[in-house]
C-alpha cells in the first residue's frame, strides 16, 4: 500500500468516525491516534493480532505506591504512557490525576472512593497490586463499568513466613531483647519465654495465607486449629473448629487472615480477648479494622495477653517517613508503642522482592489483556469473559465490548445492532447486576464502526462500550 493510499484511508476513516478524542464517557476507542497505527496494521498480515483500539501511546497509566518495576516494564513495552509515583496521593491530587487516565495501579493505601472515581471519566480498569481490594469502592466501580483486578496469592507465602517469624519472636521476647541490647542493656532472661513446639496456633481465616501458614506451623511442631465461615479441608492434621470462641479458648497463638468486611470489623474486641487463654499471643497481618486495638491494649495491660504482632492499622501513613505513626493518625499510637513485647511492622507482610515482582507481572498482565483484548478473566468485580484472540488475517473484524445492566432483553437489542454483520463469536456473562458481552463481528467496513458504536451507545442498558479492531 502506497503512502497516498494510506493517507486516503486515514482521511476517510477519520471522517467516518468523526474522531475527536474518546467518543463516550468511558470509551477509549477509537481515538485520534488510532489513525497512525493503520499502516502498521495493514502491513502486518499473518501475524497474531494484539487487539488494540488505538495507538497504545494514547493509553495513560497512573501507578501509585511504588508498584514493582516489572509492571512498569510491561506497560512501557506496550507503548502506554506511564506515570509512576512512589507514594499514594492526597484526595484532591488524586482527583486531578485520575480525570485523565485509562488505568490506575495502587497497593493497599490508596482509597479509590466513589467521590474519587466519579471524576475518572476515562478509567477502564483498576489494578490492585496486592491481595486486598477493600480500598476500592467496588460497587461504584462495577456500576461505572470499571474492571478491578488484583493478585490473589502472589504474596501469600511472604505473609505466612512473616507470621512464623513473629510467633517465635513473640514467644522468646526477641523484639524486646534486641531493643534493649541496641541501647547497651544486657538482659539474659528465660522467664515467660517459650518453645513453640507443642503449642496451639489458632488461625482465623483459612484461605490462601491461613492454609499456607498451617503447613509451616505444623512443620515446627505446632498444633493447628482454624476457624472459617466456609467449611474447608484442613491440611495435615489441622482441625477446623465450629466457633470463634472454641478457637480463642484453646489457642496459645491467635492469628487473623480474613478480609476487611463488615463482619470482620473488630472481630477481636474485648469479649474475644476475654475468651482467650491467659498469656495468649495475638497476631494481625490482615487488615487494621479486624482487631480493636484499644481493647488489645487493655487486654495486654491486664495481663490477659502476653504479646502481639501487628502489621496493619485502622489508619496507615500514605508514605514512609519518620514520625508519621503518631497519635494524630491513631489516637492510641503512643500508648501502643510504649508497651513491651508488641511487634509493630509497617504493613510489610507482602513486601518481599519475590512477592512484589510476581505481583507486578500478574496484575500488569491482567490489565494489559483487559485493555488490549477485553479479557476480564481474574477480575474481582466483573463477570469473567474471554474470547480467543484474532489474528491479522481477520482484518475487518471488530471486537465489541459491551458492559451493561443485567436486565431482560439486552442481548436481543444488541444482537439486532450487530446483526448486519456476521457475529463470528460471542460470549456474555453476568455478576451482581452487571453483565459483560464480548462479540467479534466480521465484515465491518471502517465506516460502519461509528454506526455500531452510536447504536450501542443509545441502548438503555449500556454502562460502557469499547470497540477494538
Ligand atoms: N499484611 C499484608 O501485607 C497482607 C495482608 N493481606 C490481607 O490478608 C487477607 C487474607 O488474605 P488471603 O488468605 O489471601 O485471603 P483468602 O480470601 O484466600 O482467605 C480469607 C479467608 O477468610 C475467610 N473468612 C472471610 N470472612 C470470614 C469471617 N467473618 N470469619 C471467618 N473467616 C472468614 C474466607 O472464607 C477465606 O477462607 C486479605 O484479605 C488481605 O486483607 C493479604 C496479603 C498481604
Ligand atoms: O503490599 C502492599 O501494599 C499490600 C499488601 C496487602 O495488604 C495485600 O496484598 O492485601
Image (cartoon, rainbow, N blue to C red):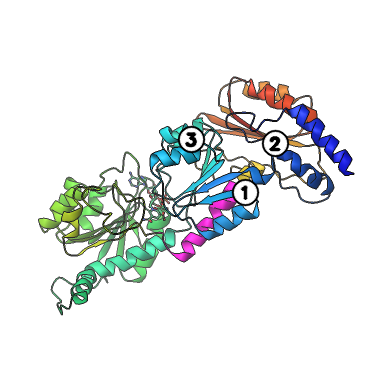
Counting residues from the start of the chain, the first of labels 1 and 2 encountered is: 2
What separation in Å lies between label 3 and label 1 (alpha carbons)? 22 Å
Above or below — where is 411 with respect to 97?
above
What separation in Å lies between label 1 and label 2 (alpha carbons)? 15 Å
Task: Identify the residue under disc 3.
Answer: 141
Query: At 36% across and 70% down in the image, what residue appears?
Result: 219
Q: Is residue 137 magenta?
A: no
- Bin the neighbour count of mark 3 within 10 Å (Cα to Cα): few under 14, some 14-19, many 20 and up: many
Going by the image, does 169 lie left or right of 452? Answer: left
> Helix, strand, or loop for circle 2?
loop
Residues tagged 1 and 2 counted as in contact (Cβ below 8 A)? no
Task: Identify the residue under disc 1.
Answer: 80
Q: Which residues are magenta?
A: 350-367
Q: Find residue 230 and report its horizontal and vertical position in percent.
A: 38, 46
- Front residue (pair 372, 287): 372
Counting residues from the start of the chain, the first of labels 3 and 1 encountered is: 1
Going by the image, does 52 lie left or right of 144? Answer: right
Q: Find residue 458 and report its horizontal and vertical position in percent.
A: 64, 20
Numbered label tally: 3
Q: Is residue 362 magenta?
A: yes
Amino acid at each position: 500500500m502506497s503512502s497516498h493510499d494510506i493517507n486516503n484511508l486515514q482521511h476517510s476513516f477519520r471522517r467516518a468516525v468523526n474522531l475527536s478524542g474518546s467518543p463516550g464517557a468511558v470509551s477509549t476507542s477509537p481515538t485520534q491516534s488510532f489513525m497512525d497505527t493503520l499502516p502498521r496494521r495493514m502491513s502486518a498480515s499473518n501475524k497474531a493480532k494484539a487487539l488494540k483500539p488505538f495507538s497504545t501511546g494514547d493509553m495513560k497509566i497512573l501507578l501509585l505506591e511504588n508498584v514493582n518495576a516489572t509492571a512498569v516494564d510491561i506497560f512501557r513495552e506496550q507503548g502506554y504512557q506511564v506515570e509512576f509515583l512512589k507514594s499514594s496521593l492526597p484526595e484532591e491530587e488524586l482527583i486531578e490525576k485520575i480525570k485523565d487516565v485509562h488505568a490506575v495501579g495502587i497497593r493497599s493505601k490508596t482509597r479509590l472512593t466513589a467521590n474519587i472515581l466519579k471524576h475518572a471519566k476515562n478509567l477502564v480498569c483498576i489494578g490492585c497490586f496486592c491481595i486486598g481490594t477493600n480500598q476500592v469502592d467496588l460497587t461504584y466501580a462495577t456500576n461505572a463499568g470499571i474492571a478491578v483486578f488484583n493478585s490473589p496469592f502472589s504474596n501469600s507465602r511472604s505473609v505466612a513466613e512473616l507470621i512464623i517469624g513473629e510467633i517465635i519472636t513473640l514467644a522468646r521476647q526477641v523484639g524486646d531483647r534486641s531493643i534493649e541490647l541496641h541501647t547497651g542493656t544486657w538482659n539474659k532472661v528465660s522467664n515467660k519465654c517459650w518453645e513453640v513446639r507443642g503449642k496451639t496456633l489458632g488461625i482465623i481465616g483459612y484461605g490462601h495465607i491461613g492454609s499456607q501458614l498451617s503447613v509451616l506451623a505444623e512443620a515446627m511442631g505446632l498444633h493447628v486449629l482454624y476457624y472459617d465461615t466456609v467449611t474447608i479441608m484442613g491440611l495435615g492434621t489441622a482441625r477446623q473448629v465450629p466457633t470463634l470462641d472454641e478457637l480463642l479458648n484453646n489457642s496459645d497463638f491467635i492469628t487473623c487472615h480474613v478480609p476487611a468486611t463488615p463482619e470482620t470489623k473488630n472481630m477481636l474486641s474485648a469479649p474475644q480477648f476475654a475468651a482467650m487463654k491467659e498469656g495468649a499471643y495475638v497476631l494481625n497481618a490482615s487488615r487494621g479494622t479486624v482487631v480493636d486495638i484499644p481493647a488489645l491494649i487493655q487486654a495486654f495491660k491486664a495481663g490477659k495477653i502476653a504479646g502481639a504482632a501487628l502489621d496493619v492499622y485502622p489508619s496507615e501513613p500514605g508514605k514512609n517517613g519518620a514520625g508519621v505513626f503518631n497519635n494524630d493518625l491513631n489516637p492510641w499510637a503512643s500508648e501502643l508503642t510504649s508497651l513491651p513485647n508488641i511487634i509493630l511492622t509497617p504493613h510489610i507482610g507482602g513486601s518481599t522482592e519475590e512477592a512484589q515482582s510476581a505481583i507486578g507481572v500478574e496484575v500488569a498482565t491482567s490489565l494489559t489483556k483487559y485493555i488490549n483484548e477485553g479479557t476480564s478473566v481474574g477480575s474481582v468485580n466483573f463477570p469473567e469473559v474471554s474470547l480467543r484472540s484474532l489474528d491479522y488475517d481477520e482484518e475487518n473484524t471488530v471486537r465489541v465490548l459491551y458492559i451493561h445492566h443485567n436486565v431482560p432483553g439486552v442481548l436481543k437489542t444488541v444482537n439486532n445492532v450487530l446483526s448486519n454483520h456476521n457475529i463470528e463469536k460471542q460470549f456474555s456473562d453476568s455478576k451482581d447486576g452487571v453483565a459483560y458481552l464480548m462479540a467479534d463481528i466480521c465484515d465491518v467496513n471502517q465506516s460502519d464502526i461509528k454506526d455500531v458504536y452510536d447504536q450501542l451507545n443509545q441502548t438503555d442498558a449500556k454502562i460502557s462500550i469499547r470497540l477494538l479492531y
